[in-house]
Image: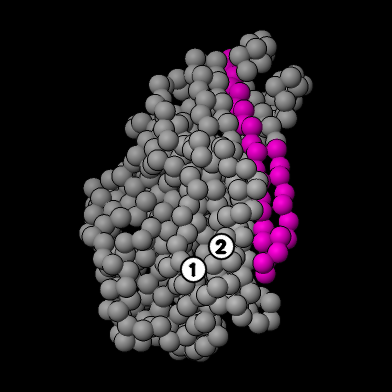
Amino acid sequence: MKTLIEKALKSCDQAEVNFRDVYSTTVTILLGNIKNIESEKKTEVALRMVKDGKMGTAIATSLEDESIISRAIISLENQTSEASAFPNAKYEAVQSSSEDVKKCTTQDLVNMAFDLSNRFKAMAEDVGFGVQIVKTLKTVKLCNSNGFDGEYDYTNVSVLTYTLSKQGFYSTMKEFTNGFIPEITDEDLSRQLMFHRLGEQPVEVGNEKMPVIFSGTAMGSLMLRVLGGVSGGNITKNVSPIVGKLGEKLFSDIMTIRDDATMPYGVNTFAFDDEGTPAQNTVLYDKGVLKNYLTSVSHAEKLGTSPTGNAIKRTLFSKEIEDAPSVYDSNLIIEGDSQPDDDIIKGVKRGLYITGVMGAHTGNINQGEFSMNISSGFLIENGTFKGKVKGAMIAGNIYDLFKGIEAIGTKMEPMRSIFYHMGYSPMVKFAEVNIIGK
């Protein structure tokens, strides 16, 4: 990597090489039989070069491919955007990889999948059940001409369990994902079976306002809007509704939100971001009070602050090494005055429990607006689930919604934002939400 940088510096003022070695194995079992076993290995290299305040980028699949330099020069000559200096800050090691995952063989994954399938079958032989397990091993290296030279390993095991309706469609889906091998209990499988049975009991709701509980997983659709608000890019462009509101109470005081790239074995844990800024634990909202924005190097310069280590090579729909670093989350964590999940459900006289939505990417995300179809939601009456809601939508704005949080649950679940994980959240109960039904 240093050799490539030395050669690149003959044609530029600064250079940076980002290297990733990724290996993944996927095992899928459907209806008690192996559906497929797939493996993928890829090496990715990205070169960024800065000259006269402009930046050019090129990618390759090997550090030996020196044509990446000439391609980066062509990119640089056709760019007009400003470039910042590459950072050179010391970073600390984090718990981003597990030796147990590294040692886990394909046969181990198969055994794990069959174990889950057999345990579920013992509970409900009449219900179609599937398991997909993905093991990911990754080595990340980053080196730049300003002296930064970093490396860390990353592991992840993601387990997706799902049930099928009598027509063969997906009925329920549940995901477990960590840097270590997740433990899935019989209670987890039993709860999934309960929601599958509820799916066989369709119910309808009208146009009304009612309490709504978002599962931890479904919270990702709302947190995408929280992220849009605190993004340094949106703050510097003055397109966020919370510009200039640091220190103000914007959400309920029973909720705290932080972004923690140092979380041990988190789904997005890393030692440094894709610019080389060390991983940090940044409190965004402390008991509802806005404390910080998330920033890259360039945004921090414009705001007169320090970068928070959130420059990630990612877009809303992709997460590839060729993407330019943008401000995104690491492990967003929702926490607060927690209550047992069952007690929260029992306390609802009439309301909805939402485990999945469609349309999370629509609407004015940066302004906090949402209008989403409820793809998986369940009606609660007098603290008891009554059936699965059909043909309903939910609409509003998070800056109104998050002021009316009444309860936060205990069990953490991985949050999803469309295609990617955002971190972890327990269930969250909102006092009153607009439901568009029949």
Relative to 339, say whether 262 is above or below: above
**Distance from Cα at disc 2 to Cα at disc 1:** 8 Å
Q: Main secondary structure of the magenta part?
A: strand
Evaluate if marks 2 and 1 touch, with contact meaning CB atoms under 8 Å apart. Answer: yes
Asked whether the viewer can see residue 411, the reply is yes
Q: Is residue 374 visible?
A: no
The region drawn magenta spans: 13-41
Which quarter of the rendering shows the N terminus? top right
Percent across and percent down for residue 224 are: 46, 56
Relative side of 16 to 212, left or right: right
Name the secondary structure under disc 1: helix
Query: Badge 1 is on which residue?
Result: 189
- Amino acid on which disc 2 is placed: Leu
Q: Nearer the viewer, residue 382 or 428?
A: 382
Residue drawn at x 31%, y 64% as measured from the top left: 409
Q: Amino acid at mark 1?
A: Leu
Q: Earlier in the sequence, mark 2 or mark 1?
A: 2
Q: Position of residue 135 (x, y in %)?
A: 59, 46
**Which residue is the site of mark 2?**
116
**Residue plotted at (47% across, 85% down):** 387
Residue closest to the eye, 84 or 161: 161
Which of 161/124 is in front? 124
Residue 289: image x %, image y %?
25, 52
Residue at image x 65%, y 38%? 23
Residue 16 rendering spot, x and y as whole percentages = 58, 22
Q: Is residue 4 left or right of residue 87?
A: right
Q: Residue at x 56, y 26 (%)?
A: 141
| Mark carried by residue 348 | none
